[in-house]
Amino acid sequence: MLLVESDGKALLRHYGIAVPEGLVISDATWAPPQAPRVVKAQVTVGGRGKAGGVALCRDAAETQAALARILGSSIKGHAVHACLVEAPATGRECYLSIMLDAGAGALRVTFIAEGGVEVESHALTPALTRLCAPDEASITAALAALTDDAAVREVGARLATLFLREELMLAEINPLFVGPCGAIAGDAKLVLDGNALHRQPGQESLLRANAALYPDALRKLDEGFDYVELDPKGSIGLITTGAGLSMMLVDELTARGAHPINFLDIRTGQLRGSPARLIRVLEWLSEHPSLRVLFVNIFAGITDQREFAQLLAAALQAQPCGGVPVVARLVGNGSEEARAWLAAARPDIAIFEDLEPSIARVAEYAA
Ligand code: GDP
Ligand code: MN
């Protein structure tokens, strides 16, 4: 998951990479110093500059106006609760990144002397990027082939240590300001590997200290399964298992103009005879006043659908989500018996074997 810039910069600083002096401000009445400042929305999304989430301010009045404009606004669908207010950095805007290139089975090191918000307009020629093995010596050698700037190489060596020790998926500094006084990180886009979190207690504390920014990651740590909120104002609550199937369903619904609230991979294999996980999910869904229908889609080879149907009925009894209609499509091991049992136990639930008619019914309820 992407760390918000202020958390990313805290990690950069910890590994000895220079970052501008700054404060995280969430109060629009804060009195800024009488000096130039950069005001930056702290949201977990890239491209803030182009979306109006970064303001270069010449004095306290401009800083205050920028805070009033950006705090409480929405940048690319992310509500801004805090801004980083920094002393402006100067120098040439360069781009530096280390990323995991899963396709190549290697790391990719990229350095572009003309970085900044238009960096994507550069074709990624071999002169700008190198694949290398995942160790500090290889990363350092790859960067040495891309630049002879000593300050950049120094930052690259420290970034390599950070990337490897923290088991990152991406470490991107754009802009890296390079000038006569050295190199200073103007931005930080660090992507953590959620599957490495249990080995990285420092990262867990970082996430917990800013819990409102990382709800999905913390939920996974605490609950052991994946629930990602897609649209807090959506109308369809999904009860699904299997990441691929769940993403496919989100796509199918979205393509029909429907609005799923969530992605869910509940892992039916881990329910272990208890409706507890299902009840947790129903509790989260019930917090959305826009919820109109629950869509249960369990397509599983091993899961005993008879047992799942009973857990589902128990969970719905414990948390009926205000009595919104339920559409259930159950296919797999024992699903014929499961559907018959559920139909008898809960005649109000619309039960299907095929996907198409179940989606059509969900769309009717959601409309
Ligand atoms: P992003 O758009 O989310 O990647 O946000 P950035 O932190 O990269 O900011 C976008 C752009 O704002 C940068 O490319 C710079 O052009 C500008 N910017 C950000 N911080 C500074 C700064 O300290 N000094 C100056 N001169 N420009 C900055
Ligand atoms: Mn940037």
Image (cartoon, rainbow, N blue to C red):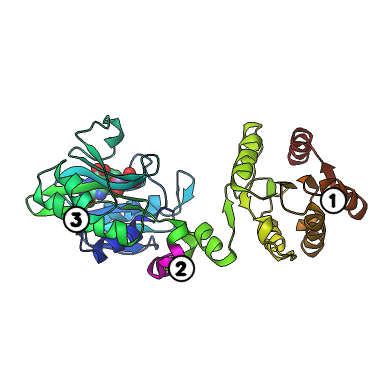
Which residue, given by chain and number where applicable, does mark 1 sit on? 338
User: Which amino acid is tagged 3?
Assistant: Ala
Q: Is residue 131 left or right of residue 364?
A: left
Which residue, given by chain and number where applicable, does mark 3 sit on? 157
Which residue, given by chain and number where applicable, does mark 2 sit on? 208
Residue at coordinates 19% horizontally, 58% vertically from top-left?
35
Q: Residues within 10 Å of mark 2 (few under 14, many from 20)?
A: some
Can residue 338 be seen?
yes
User: Which amino acid is tagged 1?
Assistant: Ala
Q: Is residue 250 left or right of residue 34?
A: right
What are the residue bounds of the magenta stretch?
197-207
User: Which amino acid is tagged 2?
Assistant: Arg
Q: Determine which quarter of the picture holds residue 94.
A: top left
Q: Which secondary structure class fits the magenta region best? A: helix
Q: Is residue 256 above or below residue 63?
A: above
What numbered label is drawn on residue 187? none
Q: Nearer the viewer, mark 2 or mark 1?
A: 1
